[in-house]
Image (cartoon, rainbow, N blue to C red):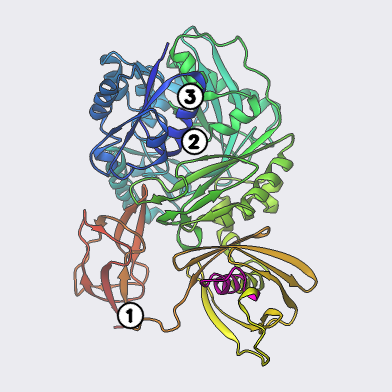
Amino acid sequence: MIRSLLVANRAEIARRIVRTCRDLGIATVAVHSDADAGAPHAREADAAVRLPGDAPADTYLRGDLLVKAALAAGADAVHPGYGFLSEHADFARAVRDAGLMWVGPPPEAMEAMASKTRAKEIMRKAGVPLLDAIDPAEATADDLPLLVKAAAGGGGRGMRVVRELDALPAELDSARAEAASAFGDGEIFVEPYMEGARHVEVQVFADTHGTVWTLGTRDCSLQRRHQKVIEEAPAPGLDEELRRTLAESAANAARAIGYEGAGTVEFLVSSAGRAYFLEMNTRLQVEHPVTEQIYGLDLVALQLRIAEGERLDPEPPAPRGHAVEARLYAEDPARDWRPQTGIMHRLEIPGLRVDSGPADGDAIGVHYDPMLAKVIAVAPTRAEAVRRLAHGLERARIHGPVTNRELLVRALRHPEFEAARMDTGFLERHLAELTAAASGHDEAASLAALAAALADAARRPGTATVAGRLGGWRNVPSQPQSRSYRAEPGGTEHEVRYRLTREGPHAADMSDVRVLGAAAELVVLDVAGVRRTFEVTAHGDRRYVDTPQGGFVFTALPRFPDPTARAEPGSLLAPMPGTVVRVAEVAVGDRVEAGQPLLWLEAMKMEHRVTAPAAGVLTALHATAGRQVEVGALLAVVAAGE
């Protein structure tokens, strides 16, 4: 029996494991980097051990430190979560060699699946359908498009889609460099890229007595940069024969490597309905909650019981209903998925299951994945589950960095998604549509800006409401008050004008708007006969305005902007805090073309290209590989023109 468990991970998955351990009566030990010293997962565990440093390579990826932490805290078992060292066979062996229980598959099974190239050889012998690899030296135009993939690791790192043969050598080099940086292994391979394919996976569980469960299917087709964004179970629109093929292939894959514990076998399903093996993840998946919701199981508890030697029932329980999960990321989809940092003041999504990493007041930094939370809805039918999830996200209170919330809501309500006609190219294909200003958005934003201005007026010292501040002595109309706000991220500026009268405030430029109430945190407007409520929260110069139809974020602008807060034309400023991982082979004085990559920044486990804003001459280059930069740091200058 496990009495004390060390969770060798952080954030959402660490909190998830601690929650189950508390239900089972198991004491927990957390580990934390210096950046995570005050993180919820460290606070919620029964004990916590510091891993000195901030970078993952110095902390959560140090297997020796994790084993020492477990022994020092008196733990008798280790759960790796997902990511970091969860699929490292050497770490599993080190845990076992230290006399600790490993909550995961045997190291030999992990090694068999660690390299995607070796995994495919094993699957071929087991009769699992798969795509044949292509020798890049012999690739022709008839083979296009191609997919370059890292043999180790996952999460979209070291992965490139190649649509032009001339671009293949450069993409191979780029993928090798990223794979080596991310996984310490630069091995890559090439296979056909299947246009219009779906990403479908099967959850497997195997005990130590020979029983293997397959817990239905999950569709994970909605992805950005080959990383999942929306997942659901069961995968819709598959005929019974295909479901049977997927389940049998997944079970055969698990048996072929002597698997134990939780694992996921991933497939590409072509538009013609044929399945091809992608990889097997020898760990719990991020998207496991959708399977939990329809099977009524706690998959973490199941992992722990299997590690303790318990037998699975001969057959798993029958599934019921449909579940959909959306990953809430701190990123800006309209700006190349740029990750965002800052303080998460409030994260509240009532009525839905929310598995979150940060808590209110926590800082979102640059060292780790930008996922803030997973939001899960379950209902008897797919249509109801999708509707519940979209509605809950729309009404969420998210006060902090910019997120992908709006994109999630629009994707869930897109006609193709509602009809289950999606594939792995869905988000890329519809990105402009999903991030464009919606019809009526400007009008709604103007009303929200008015609410922010009225709440700011009510927030002045000594008053509870705007109307309550006004004395009866005034018998002449007041001059209009003016406030300016910029919609975030980096959007339209709204100048709001309102007049304070004996009867209360009036909107100066909106004839169909009446102010019914204006307090510091709640503004009520009558808009053309329809009553609208606006909850307003202030944090510094930011104003968060929440309505039943969605949320708005504004920056209150000063009356007199700082004239020095400008950059010279052609300046390339760091769009986010991060680390310069590579610099292109260019030098000051070289001519560069518009859009030419000059350097690559890594932040939140993703690489971002910084490109020349226009054709011209590179007149300054301040970036070097390994340099840490803050947001707004000057990286380079390109003088436009000949």
Q: Which mark is residue 569?
A: 1
Residue 284 visible (yes or no): no
Q: Residue furthest bottom?
A: 476
593 w.r.t. 301: above or below: below
Q: Which residue is mark 2?
A: 286
Q: Earlier in the sequence, mark 1 or mark 2?
A: 2
Q: Which residue is mark 3?
A: 22
Q: Residue at x 42, y 16 (%)?
A: 257
**429 in the magenta segment:** no
Left or right of residue 457, residue 227 in this image: left
Amino acid at circle 3: Arg
Image quadrant containing the N terminus: top left
Provide the secondary structure element on which disc 2 rests. Answer: loop
Q: Name the spot of residue 590 as percent of width and height, x first.
A: 22, 73
* Residue 94 position within the rendered picture, expressed as x and y whole percent measured from the top left: 26, 20
Does the stretch in magenta take in 460? yes
Is 517 drawn above or below residue 71 in the view shown? below
Q: Residue at x 33, y 80 (%)?
A: 569
Residue type highlighted by circle 1: Pro
